[in-house]
Amino acid sequence: MRKLIFLHVVILKKINALLALIATSSLFFASSIYAGEKWGVDKELSTISFELPVLFAKNVRGTFKNIEGFIEIDLDKKKNNKAIFSVVINSIDMNYAKYRDLLLSDIFFDAKQFPIAVVDTKKFSYQNEKKITLDVEVTIKDKSEIVPLTILVKRLGEELVQIETELSFSRTFFNIGTGKWSNTTILKDKATIKTNLFLFKE
């Protein structure tokens, strides 16, 4: 009887050891599958700018001081890359300084209610191209729209990459300019966002 109990104990120990080995192997295998690189934004060098055409006057131009973002690179399959970038609306510096409060008000960006604008690439494929075009999701004032984004990639070193992008969107779709400001005769509808981002490997 004692031998039988001892044999059961030995078998259970071996089973537990085997299960532990399988679990460890699974974790290692999973981490290998999802292994990737994460690149962060150098906020000192990077810029995100905004431009809106005006009839018979200088275009409205601004640069956001407070930006965040990252890119995750899928080193294995090259298909599950993703990037998210955001700006704090009230961090904008603009050429029409006297109209800054108007731009941040609920007539335009409504910065108090919707302080952040976001660009999200979702998942995308990347095979070390120097130029790619993606459909990305732009979210402003809690509204989202899919728009094309052109991306230029310049590798400056093993751990530093420069990314220049440009996209256009309809300001009226996002209710940027309500009431009399929704008229697109003077203040045009097509707005442009340009980025010059420097990314470092984390």
Image: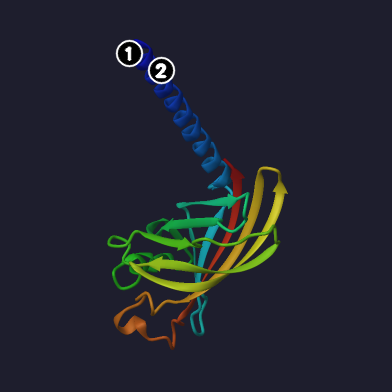
> Which one is closest to the eye, mark 1 or mark 2?
1
- Is residue 82 among what the camera can see? yes
Image point 54% across, 71% down: which residue? 167
Looking at the picture, how far across and down is residue 157, in whole percent? Answer: 72, 45
> Which circle's residue, 1 or 2, is located before the other in the chain?
1
Give SS at disc 1: loop
Disc 1: which residue: 1
Residue in the foreground of this view, choosing between 26 and 147: 26
User: Left or right: 4 with respect to 57?
Assistant: left
Q: In the rendered view, tell whether residue 138 sits above or below residue 25.
A: below
Say if mark 1 contacts mark 2, CB within 8 Å: no
Outermost residue toward the front in this view: 1
Q: In the rendered view, tell whether residue 22 sits above or below residue 46.
A: above
Q: What crowding class fits label 1: few (fewer than 14 Cα within 10 Å), some (14-19), or many (20 or more)?
A: few
Q: In the rendered view, tell whether residue 144 sits above or below residue 195.
A: below
Identify which amino acid the numbered label 1 is placed on: Met
Residue in the foreground of this view, choosing between 168 and 131: 131
Q: Which quadrant would the N terminus be assigned to in this image?
A: top left
Q: In the rendered view, tell whether residue 146 sits above or below residue 5.
A: below
Disc 2: which residue: 7
User: Left or right: 114 with respect to 151?
Assistant: left
Q: What crowding class fits label 2: few (fewer than 14 Cα within 10 Å), some (14-19), or many (20 or more)?
A: few
Please identify the quarter of the rendering in which residue 130 is found. bottom right
- Is residue 41 among what the camera can see? no
Residue in the foreground of this view, choosing between 72 and 115: 72
Identify which amino acid the numbered label 2 is placed on: Leu
Marks 1/2: CA–CA distance: 10 Å
Q: Which quadrant would the C terminus be assigned to in this image?
A: top right
Looking at the picture, how far across and down is residue 189, in whole percent? Answer: 45, 81
Image point 34% across, 65% down: which residue? 104
Looking at the picture, how far across and down is residue 197, in whole percent? Answer: 59, 55
User: Left or right: 181 with respect to 127?
Assistant: left
